[in-house]
Image (spheres, rainbow, N blue to C red):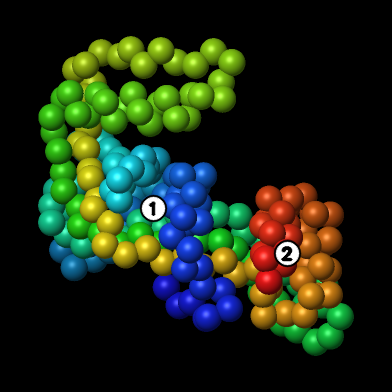
Amino acid sequence: MYIPSHFRVDDRELMDQFIVENSFGLLVSTENDAPVASHLPFHYKDNTLLCHVAKANPQWQDLEGQRVLVIFPGSHAYVSPTWYAGPGVPTWNYQAVHVYGRATCFHDEARLGELVRTLSSLHESSSDSPWSGEFDSRMLQAIVGIEITIEDIQGKYKLSQNKSEQDQRNVIEQLEEQGETTLAEQMRKSLAGS
C-alpha cells in the first residue's frame, strides 16, 4: 500500500486495536497466478489471524504456505475541496490496515469448533439474547480453518493531516453534518495528537 509519511501509522498497539475493532477483512491470495479474495470475519490473537471459509470456496485449496494479504478497512468518506479555506482537490479520507503473512489450513474439528465459538462469542457479546454456541458438529466438515502467521503490518490513516488545522476542523464539521461521525471522531483524535 502506498503510504505517504504524514498518513503512516507505525504504532503497533494502535494497529492491533484497529484490527480488533474492524475485524471483518478481505483475504487476498493467488490462484493460478490470478488474485482471489474472500470477505471474512477474523480473530486476531498472538500475532496470528484466524478465520474459516466454506469448503466449497476454492480459495483455500492453493492457500497452504502462500504469502497472503488481509485488508482491514475502517471508516471512510468523500472530502470535497469546497470544505477547505483555500484551494484543494476532491479526495477521500479513510483508515486501513494491511496484514501480510503466511497461511496454513486446518481441518481438525475440535479446533474448527473452537474458532466458530470464539468468533460467534465476539460478535454475539452485544446481543440481548446471544447465541449459545451449540451447533451440529457435522457442519464443521463443510468449512476449512485458516491460520495466518503475521509477517508485516502496515497502517494508513488518511485524515487530512497534510492540511491546515482550520481545513481539518472544516472537514470534521462537514463529516459530522453528513453523519460520518466515526471518521470525524478519528480525525479529531488525530488533530489532538499532532
Tag count = 2
Residue located 39% across and 47% down the image: 39
Question: Given the image, on which type of amino acid does mark 2 rest?
Answer: Ala
The residue singled out by tag 1 in the image is 26
Q: Residue 57: x percent and y percent? A: 24, 42
Q: Residue furthest right?
A: 85
Which quadrant of the structure image shows residue 107? Answer: top left
**Quadrant containing the N terminus in the rendered view:** bottom left
Residue located 20% across and 57% down the image: 102
* Label 1 vs 2, first from the N-terminus: 1
Q: Residue furthest bottom?
A: 87
Q: Residue 35: x percent and y percent? A: 28, 63
Name the mark nearer the viewer: 1 or 2. 2
Which quadrant of the structure image shows residue 141? Answer: top left
Mark 1–mark 2 Cα distance, whole angstroms, equals: 31 Å
- Quick check: 61 left or right of 128? left
- Quick check: 64 left or right of 167? left
- Quick check: 185 left or right of 141? right
Q: Is residue 136 depicted above or below 192 in this figure? A: above
Q: Is residue 177 depicted above or below 136 in this figure? A: below
Q: Is residue 73 visible?
A: no
**Quadrant containing the C terminus in the rendered view:** bottom right
Residue located 21% across and 16% down the image: 137
Question: Given the image, on which type of amino acid does mark 1 rest?
Answer: Leu
The residue singled out by tag 2 in the image is 192
